[in-house]
Image (spheres, grey):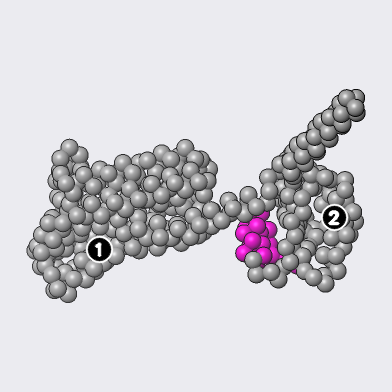
Amino acid sequence: MIGIETSERRISAGLVVLVACTMIVGLSVASYATQLVLFYEDGCPHCARIESFLQRIEPDYPQLKIVRHEIHDPDAHDLLNRLLSAYGANLGSVPIIFIGDVAMVANTFYGLPNSPVTLSGRTAEMKLEQVIADAIDTNAPSPMTKAEAATGTELTRKLTIPAVILAAAADSVNPCTFAVLVLLLGTLLVAGKKGKMWQAGLAFIAAVYVSYFLMGIGIFSAIQAAGVQRPFILVVSGLAILLGLWNTKDYFAYGKWFTIEVPTRWRPLVKKITSSVVSVPGAFAVGVLDSLFLLPCSSGPYIAILALLSKTTTKSHGIGLLLFYNLIFILPLLIITLAVSLGYTTTARAEKWRSARLGKLHLISGIIMFLLGAGMIIAVQLKYM
């Protein structure tokens, strides 16, 4: 009896070990399973052929996990769009497969050297099997990981336009430009050139717009050509936060220590040049000069937005957003020019309004700059940029 009980205990222990080993192996295979995502359509002959092919090779690749989605399933549409975006593939007919770094739409492969590459028949099946084997060998991450990253990138792109609007709005309440424009209009008024105020104001604004835009294009192109890296984005974001905090300081202690405006020692020169202008071409020249003097006031939001655009947009789209940014930037200048030219206010009142609200203008700009910098850091940390 003792011998029998001992044998039973040994058999039981062996079974426990066997089950444990089986579970470990199963968990190991599950942990390292390579996921293939297949979109198909019921009744599609091409889908049936791919399905037959996958079932045929599946026993040879126990690490392969196939996730199937019927193309007409409402939930499949959003996932398919995100995957296509993540893999840089174009929408086409089913079957559509995603695995590793490769997408196959019908018989067109994306993610291969010299892709997209279109194959057919047995050649396409052989290439797909090779892609599956490579993905398993490299323990490629699930396509869902790419879809999640694409969702984050798409979210960042959607938030880019609001960020451009906010930064441009912060930049537009620029006390430096207000001061120069009011001084210019006042000079024309004193010189008896009231009839030219509208034209001179528009020339000044056009010069600011063109100069600011061209400087932006140059910086944007340079950043894109260099290839923006994560440390650069973090540095620019940190700079935006510091400038935001410093601008906010000017609401509570304006003029103390250092103020983000045209340096005091430059102001007599700017005033002297502006006070001598009595013509439309002269107003344009002052606008160009003013754009250079603007840099201490405006470089923070502008550079932050340029860094953001370089990571989230193409060059053509970025140029369009820069045009939009600068349109918002000059909008207050247009309002001031129109109000003074049509007699709704005077240059003295405009200057009094500007001087009385310097602190608030800095506060608004500072808060927006802080939020922009913090938002960019969060996007980088979440790998959305």
For marks 1 and 2, give the CA distance: 65 Å
Give the side of residue 359 with respect to residue 110, left or right: left
Measured from the top left, where is residue 35 in percent x and y? 73, 49
- Residue drawn at 11 percent across, 67 percent down: 346
Measured from the top left, where is residue 296 in percent x and y? 27, 45
User: Label 2 amino acid?
Assistant: Leu
Q: Which of marks 1 and 2 is nearer the N terminus?
A: 2
Give the side of residue 260 with respect to residue 186, left or right: right
Secondary-structure class at tag 1: helix
- Residue 138 lies, with reference to residue 324, above or below; the image says above
Q: Magenta segment, which residues?
A: 76-94
- Residue drawn at 18 percent across, 71 percent down: 339
Q: Which mark is residue 45?
A: none
Dominant secondary structure (helix, strand or loop) of the stretch shown in magenta: helix
Foreground pick, 71 / 176 = 71
Residue 41 visible: yes
User: Label 1 amino acid?
Assistant: Leu
Q: Which mark is residue 54?
A: 2
Q: Is residue 91 magenta?
A: yes
